[in-house]
Image (cartoon, helix red, strand yellow):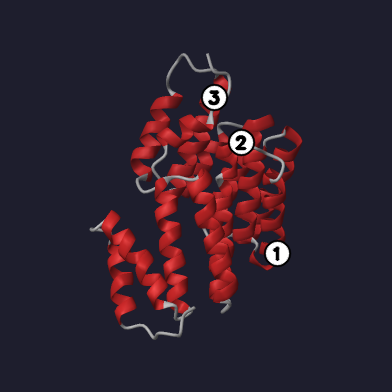
Amino acid sequence: MVDRLEQAELDAIWNFDDPVASADRFAAAAAEPHRPELVRAELETQRARALGLQRRYDEADALLDLLGPATDTLGVRVLLERGRLRNSAGRAAEATALFEDALDAARREGETFLAVDAAHMLAISDPERSERWTAEAFDLLSGTSDPRTLRWSVALHNNRGWRLFEEGTPVSALAEFEAAVDAARAYGTDEQRFASEWTVARCLRELGRIHEAERIVRALADERPEDEAVAAELAALTDATHTIEP
């Protein structure tokens, strides 16, 4: 009998594009009588997260209330999900305080995966210190060889890239987006790899490197002919301004 919640099981249950079905699956899994109480409680934190994605914030908070007072790994998860609820509700300062507590608690518990999650969320909720939190997340990743934990590097590079892109520095953004592609190929899902390649193409278009962008997007279109984002990018490339490329 597994006495802790494994990330592989969470990955199998989660579908972030369908939080309603995800919440139902987490409720069913948490109700299975053979599971240890701690595992059932951890599953409920993920049901709360799925409720938050549906903007059912009060229900999600009430569910987390039932799990307290929570300590150890469960306590980290409760702090993370309360933080996500506050952040989604536009209460960034409250979210940041909760994520900072989650990061400290995860470090104490030796939960590197959850510590990186907390630092990643801090980079979102606390944009003025985003670079600091992203650097902290990468520092945590430097101490692990676990491929599933290292998958966080995809999101970290991608988020940093978009921030640089929005700040008007697409050259620096491109380096981050390309690093996200490398990380996705090494540790990520096929969906992450596909999305990361699309993002590189989008940044290349911004830089006027149209031929390079078009090569990437046409390859993605061959892979997924019905993808709307790829079709839209192909259309945008036909009207884009070219530069002299190396």
Describe the element under mark 3 as helix, strand or loop.
helix
- Which of marks 3 and 1 precedes in the sequence? 3
Three-letter amino acid code at the position of disc 3: Val
- Residue at the spot of label 2: 146
Three-letter amino acid code at the position of disc 1: Arg
In three-dimensional space, the C-alpha distance between marks 2 and 3, rounded to whole angstroms, equals: 21 Å
x, y percent for residue 97: 69, 53
Q: Residue at x 31, y 83 (%)?
A: 239
Describe the element under mark 1 as helix, strand or loop.
helix
x, y percent for residue 191: 40, 49
Q: Residue at x 68, y 39 (%)?
A: 144
Q: Is residue 38 left or right of residue 212?
A: right
- Toward which corner of the image does residue 240 lie, by quadrant? bottom left
- Residue 162 appears in view: yes
> Between 55 and 123, which is closer to the camera in this rendering?
123
Q: Residue at x 45, y 85 (%)?
A: 244
Quick one: which residue is furthest to the front in this view?
246
- Crowding at mark 3 (Cα within 10 Å: few <14, some 14-19, many 20+): some
- Residue at the spot of label 1: 129
In three-dimensional space, the C-alpha distance between marks 1 and 3, rounded to whole angstroms, equals: 34 Å
Q: Which mark is residue 39?
A: 3
Above or below residue 111? Residue 152 is below
**Tags 2 and 3 touching, CB below 8 Å:** no
